[in-house]
Image (tube, helix red, strand yellow):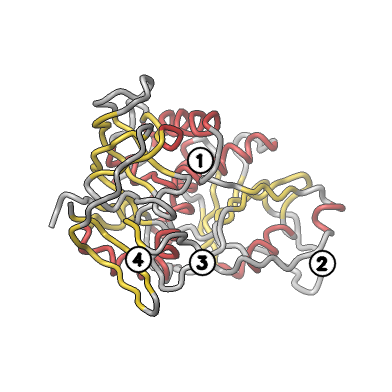
Amino acid sequence: MRCFVIREGSGTFSRGVEEYEPPVPDPGDVQVRVDYSGVNYKDALVASASSRVRRVPVLVGGVDAAGIVVTSPDPAIPAGTPVCVHGGELGVARDGGFAPLVYAPSRLVSVLPSSISTRDAMVIGTAGFTAMESVLALEHHGLEPGAEVLVTGATGGVGSLAVSFLRARSYQPVASTGSPQESAWLVERGATRVIGRDEIADRPDRVLASERWAGAIDCVGGETLHHILRSLRYGAGVAASGLVASPDLNTNVYPFITRAVALLGIDAVETSPVTRTNVWRELGEVAAHVDFTGLIDSTISLAGLDEALETIRSGKTRGRIVVDPTTN
């Protein structure tokens, strides 16, 4: 079958669409016919030469996919069920979703709510799952109804979906972006206002900035996360899932010991089955209030993946890139 395959050998590297015979699946794997997959920042890392994320020399890329179950050993996920497949080693150490078929253990397969189609599931994808997980983490930490919440990297997958989900749950999302030309689009997604990257915090000469944000969802990391921590209100939290700017965090303890702020780490890869079920249930609840079509940057074929991976690596997307593996 035609798949997007990444290959690295001794001094060689290639990626592209080719005829590929996948390994024999494990007896416990669920087989899913892929309707759509999505392009994530992690996919760009996996598909890079000398990648530190990819764990095997040859694999089909794609860390998420959505489609219909073909065969399943799990009675809770019978054939014909619409599902989303994501997390674990998918697209990193085992063949992923850039293919017409994907195999995965049932722990990585989530039954979709009836309100979410397989296409919308990939507009959501790993990015949207991360966004909703971030919203729920802030709520668990005590985020109050109607509060103003900062979202960084707002034109990207996690950021744009976080803006939409926050607004659907009656919060006031403030979108931070380095692409001011996309301000109108972000307002359409639900942002109450749009600010630049350099407007997150003030008082750069002091260890703490003014208390501004009741909560924050950070998709950027690095210096941006440092400025968020120093500008959170007393007792507020930031849900952090990104490292687009940098994986390093150079900060100090003042926000933690004088304002009791919290740094909430968000992981969408090895999260528990209970969390998966809870997040997808909440996604099903907000689905009626979100314009998923407006969140699509583009829909591409497998042949368009090479360009799309570079686009998402450079941070030039506006929402989600959706892959239809059945088109030429």
Query: Which of the two marks, 4 or 3, is nearer to us in this view?
Result: 3
Numbered circle sitting on residue 309: 4
Of 134 and 234, the residue lying toward us: 134
Earlier along the polypeptide chain: callout 1 or callout 3? 3
For label 2, the SS is loop
Q: Which residue is mark 3?
A: 52
Earlier along the polypeptide chain: callout 2 or callout 4? 2
For label 1, the SS is helix
Earlier along the polypeptide chain: callout 4 or callout 1? 1
Q: Which residue is mark 2?
A: 207
Picture residue at 22% right of the left edge, 56% below the top = 20
Cα distance between the residues tagged 4 and 3: 16 Å
Which amino acid is tagged 1? Met
Of 245 and 98, the residue lying toward us: 98
Instruction: Assess disc 1: are there few (<14), some (14-19) or many (≥20) residues with their C-alpha within 10 Å of its C-alpha.
Output: many
Pick the quarter of the image with the C terminus. bottom left
Instruction: Assess disc 4: are there few (<14), some (14-19) or many (≥20) residues with their C-alpha within 10 Å of its C-alpha.
Output: many
Cα distance between the residues tagged 1 and 3: 27 Å
Query: Which of the two marks, 1 or 3, is nearer to us in this view?
Result: 3
**Number of marks:** 4
Instruction: Assess disc 2: are there few (<14), some (14-19) or many (≥20) residues with their C-alpha within 10 Å of its C-alpha.
Output: some
Which amino acid is tagged 3? Arg
The picture places residue 301, in percent across and down from the top left corner, at 20, 57
Q: Which residue is mark 1?
A: 132
Query: Which of the two marks, 1 or 2, is nearer to us in this view?
Result: 1
Q: Quadrant of residue 56?
A: bottom left
